[in-house]
Amino acid sequence: MVKTAVDIEDLVIWTYQAQRADVIEGWSDSREGDWLAGGNRTIEAVLIERGAIGCEIDTSPVPASSRLHPDAEAIHEAVTGLGSRIEIGLLIQHGRAGTRPDWLPAARTRIVPAEMRWSRRHREYRPRIEYDRNRNPVCCPVRIVDHPQKIEAARTVYAIWREALADLAEVFRLHPARLRDHAVAGPRAPARPWEAASAPAGRDAMPRRAYGG
């Protein structure tokens, strides 16, 4: 039997978006609660607190007639067998949504005034300046836009997601018989897109059409 070669990312999207494998297989919200709880202050807990990741599991009833494709079942089994709970959450979350983690390609760390005020004299908005009792300028309160830690956190999440895809693809390259109709390719997603000179300026987390095989 000739198998269809499909990128692992598209297979994951198909598994969770079209097949809804996590729902049919009963991937319960209690399990999700375990890894979202975080426990100790690990990098997982920090990233979750920052809102960098999240995975709300849909536990709505599934019709009794629902049947899971054997390849989707195999993909889901391999995903939930990954060693890292954060990898499992990222693959399921972005598989459902058909997205990639946003690595903030347009982010640029800069310092800007904390507040702008309208100047009647100059008829324009100007930074708020603080003065001493003699009306001498003392300072201009500022804030940091796109803090380096924010950018690093976003790119760490993307790197974890991409590595999880690569690990998943390797499972099926080593054991191709686990899939009946598909052969795994990829992942085509770049490993560190921010290092590429031609990295796009737009956001990379827009929904994409799921594989519908």
Image (cartoon, rainbow, N blue to C red):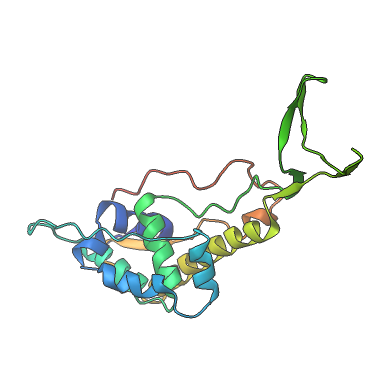
The number of numbered badges drawn on the structure is: 0
Q: Would residue 24 appear left or right of 105 to someone viewing this image?
A: left
Q: From the viewer's perspective, is residue 201 above or below residue 156?
A: above
Q: Quadrant of the N terminus?
A: bottom left
Q: Position of residue 9 (x, y in %)?
A: 42, 57
Residue 176 can be seen, yes or no: no
Question: What residue do we see at 32% from left, 61% from top?
Answer: 182
Q: From the viewer's perspective, is residue 96 above or below residue 33?
A: above
Between 123 and 210, the one lying in front of the other is 123
Q: Quadrant of residue 54?
A: bottom left
Q: Would residue 146 appear left or right of 60 to someone viewing this image?
A: right
Between 60 and 66, the one lying in front of the other is 60
Q: Residue furthest left?
A: 64
Q: Position of residue 22 (x, y in %)?
A: 26, 63
Q: Position of residue 59 (x, y in %)?
A: 22, 60
Q: From the viewer's perspective, is residue 167 above or below residue 104?
A: below
Q: Would residue 81 appear left or right of 29 to someone viewing this image?
A: right
Q: Would residue 31 appear left or right of 98 to someone viewing this image?
A: left
Residue 39 can be seen, yes or no: yes
Between 81 and 1, the one lying in front of the other is 81
Question: What residue do we see at 33% from left, 69% from top?
Answer: 32
Between 104 and 119, the one lying in front of the other is 119
